[in-house]
Amino acid sequence: MDRVARLPCACCGCYGVQVHHIRETMGMGQRASNWLVIPLCPSCHTGPKGIHGDRSMLKIIKADELSLLADTMRLLAIGAA
C-alpha cells in the first residue's frame, strides 16, 4: 500500500492521495483486501462527487473502480512508484 500511496490520484492526477479499498462484489461483513486499492486524492475519495459521495466523478471520467485498479496495477508494474 505504500507504493500505491506514492502514486498520483487515479482520477485527477493530483498528489497527496489516500488509499481507497475497493469493495466491489464484497458483502457488508467482509474485510476489504489490501491488494485491491487505488490512490485517490481527498476530493475524489471523500468529496461530494467522490467515491464515498455521489460518485459522479466516475461518470465524468467515464471509469469505474475496477478500471482504475487496472490503471494502478499498470503503473506499479512499470515502476512508477
Image (tube, helix red, strand yellow):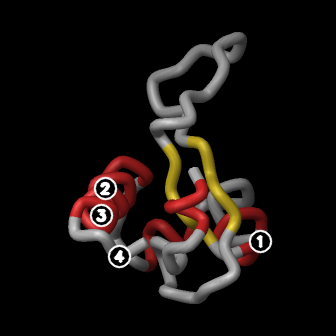
Query: In the figure, is residue 25 to the left or right of 78?
Result: right
Question: Between marks 3 and 4, how big is the CA–CA gap?
Answer: 11 Å
Q: Quadrant of residue 60?
A: bottom left
The first of marks 2 and 1 along the sequence is: 1
Q: Disc 2 vs disc 4: Cβ atoms closer than 8 Å?
A: no
- Labelled pair 3, 2 in contact (Cβ < 8 Å): yes
The kind of residue on which mark 1 rests is: Gly
Amino acid of disc 2: Met
Height in image: 1 above or below 79?
above
For disc 4, the neighbor class at 10 Å (few under 14, some 14 to 19, many from 20) is few
Q: Secondary structure at mark 3?
A: helix
- Residue 44, how many percent across, how many down? 64, 72
**Secondary structure beneath label 4:** loop
Residue where numbered disc 3 is placed: 71
Closest to the observer: 14 or 1? 1
Residue at which label 1 appears = 47
Which callout, 3 or 4, points at the residue further toward the start of the chain? 3
Looking at the image, the residue that sits furthest to the bottom is: 14
- Tag on residue 80? 4
Q: CA distance from mark 1 to mark 4?
A: 26 Å
Look at label 4 and name its amino acid. Ala
Type of amino acid under label 3:
Asp
Residue at label 2?
73
